[in-house]
Image (tube, helix red, strand yellow):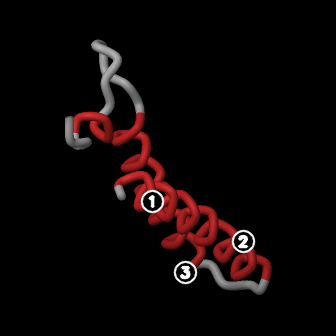
Amino acid sequence: MLDAVLSMLMLAAIALAAGAFVLFRRGERKRPVLMLVLAAVMLVNLGIWTLPDAGGNTLAQNTQPQ
C-alpha cells in the first residue's frame, strides 16, 4: 500500500512541475513558483522515505509488516 502512495506522490510532483511550466509560459508568476515549491517539498519527502540510512534500511521498509 505504501508503494502505491509513494508512486502517486511522485506522479503528483511531476504533474505539479508540468502545470507550473504551463502557467509560467502563460505569463503568471506567483502560482507557478508556489507549485514548484510544493513539488520540491513532495520530492524531499519522497527522498526521506526511500533513501537508505547507514544500516541500509529505509523508512518504507521499516513500516512493512514482517
**Is 42 located above or below residue 66 in the figure?**
below
Q: Which mark is residue 21?
A: 2
* Mark 2 or mark 1, earlier in chain: 1
Nearer-the-camera pick, 38 or 15: 15
Task: Find the distance from the CA under tag 1 to the CA under tag 3.
Answer: 28 Å
Give the crowd class for mark 3: few <14, some 14-19, many >=20 residues within 10 Å. few
Q: Secondary structure at mark 3?
A: helix
* Mark 1 or mark 3, earlier in chain: 1
Q: Nearer the viewer, mark 2 or mark 1?
A: 1
Residue visible at 45% across and 65% down? 38
Left or right of 19? Residue 44 is left
**Is 22 located above or below residue 58 in the figure?**
below
Image coords of residue 66 (percent x, y): 20, 35
Task: Find the distance from the CA under tag 2 to the CA under tag 1.
Answer: 26 Å
Location of mark 1 (residue): 4
Task: Find the distance from the CA under tag 3 to the CA under tag 2.
Answer: 10 Å
Residue visible at 41% across and 61% down? 5
Q: Quadrant of residue 22?
A: bottom right
Q: Which mark is residue 31?
A: 3
**Is 3 located above or below residue 5 in the figure?**
above
Q: Secondary structure at mark 2?
A: helix
Image coords of residue 34 (percent x, y): 49, 72
Give the crowd class for mark 2: few <14, some 14-19, many >=20 residues within 10 Å. some
